[in-house]
Amino acid sequence: MSVLVIGGAGYIGSHAAHALKRKGYKVIIYDNLSTGHASLASGFELIVGDISDTPKLAAVLRRVDSVMHFAAHAYVGESVSHPRKYFQNNLVVGLSLLDAVLDSRVRKFIFSSTCAVYGNPAKIPITEETPRLPVNPYGASKLAFEYALEAYDRAYGLRFVSFRYFNASGADESGLIGEIHDPETHLIPVAFEAIHAERGVLEIYGDDYPTPDGTCVRDYIHVNDLAEAHILGLEHLERGNSAELNLGTGRGHSVREVISTIERISGREVPKRMSPRRPGDPSELVADPTRAEKLLSWKATRSLEEIVSTAWKWSQNKRGATSTN
Ligand code: UDP
């Protein structure tokens, strides 16, 4: 079985590629390296190309049985200030990929969606029945792609799984691959940058939310728990089924809890200060992962401690700075 991993030189895509390889799948990575890193694709066949390059894509599609699509822009704040980029890349270019797939013999497609399709849900935990009402262009671009998949499934028999990720975090246990974003905005790597004095202090965006300690609550899920779900998603497709599934742990952690876990595991204090709320941040986002657990016989097994310790190991390796550990 051959899988084309589009965006496989990025954070989640590279972890999925490694998980596939461990399970014996043949993997081809397709990435334009605009935000991806060739180092994360090392050990794989890497085809450097744009998804808008239909002839190039068509040639690769002839060599695979299924496609996983991770290539997208994913900064919520940027999507608000620069929506054109998000609708163009995530939707318009994404649809040209979908049509290239349709014009090939591939009929199995896995899509990286997001809990941002739910916007500010009225009820926590979030099930797949929660209305999809995104509150930013990033979530809207992902939702539009979900609609296209639903229609292509019904009309053309293109089977798909849309995975709605909660907060992807952590790194492969090997320490060889992990999160690299430029600029970095995510809580755990930003805290590491503050520890290493590579930026100012970590700003805690708001402590007046209606949560137990006043800071936002999120469902942090280890990237390898996500990666393993993708393999089970492929098996679901092989059984001829489509699905839209939340991928989360079902447990929420506050910003303060994450910071204290980082301090405990790294043995370093995170320089931090309180700041105003970040516009667009919902107070709490926690998945109800029951549907994925039932349909895929999957469960997120890694804890917040494992998320932080693998991310810390990766960040130390990346910096080549074990002496500061
Ligand atoms: N956060 C923070 N300071 C930062 C980055 C993030 O307080 O420098 C908070 C943010 O408000 C949110 C949580 O950490 O409540 C997770 O944010 P992140 O950007 O990692 O993921 P998101 O939930 O936005 O996808």
Image (cartoon, grey):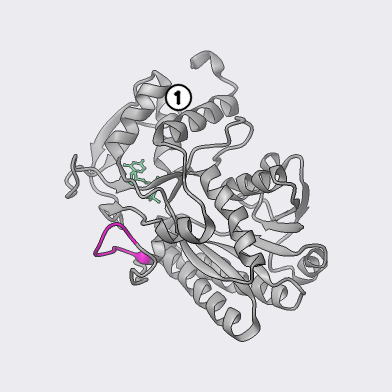
Q: Is residue 125 magenta?
A: yes
Residue at 42% in and 43% down: 186
Residue at 40% in and 61% down: 116
Q: Quadrant of residue 149?
A: bottom right
Q: Quadrant of residue 5?
A: bottom right
Foreground residue, 63 or 139? 63
Disc 1 is placed on an element classified as: loop
Query: In which quadrant of the rendered image does the N terminus lie?
Result: bottom right
Left or right? Give the position of 23 relative to 245.
right
Q: Which residues are magenta?
A: 118-126
How many badges with numbers are in the image? 1
Residue at 67% in and 51% down: 33
Quick check: which quadrant has ligand 1? Answer: top left
Residue 82, given in percent of the width and then of the height, sits at 45, 63
Foreground residue, 34 or 27? 27
Left or right? Give the position of 252 relative to 296.
left
Residue type at the position of mark 1? His
Residue 24, given in percent of the width and then of the height, sits at 74, 47
In the displayed structure, 33 sits above or below 317; it is below
Q: Is residue 33 magenta?
A: no
On the image, numbered disc 1 is attached to which residue?
196
In the displayed structure, 122 sits above or below 181; it is below
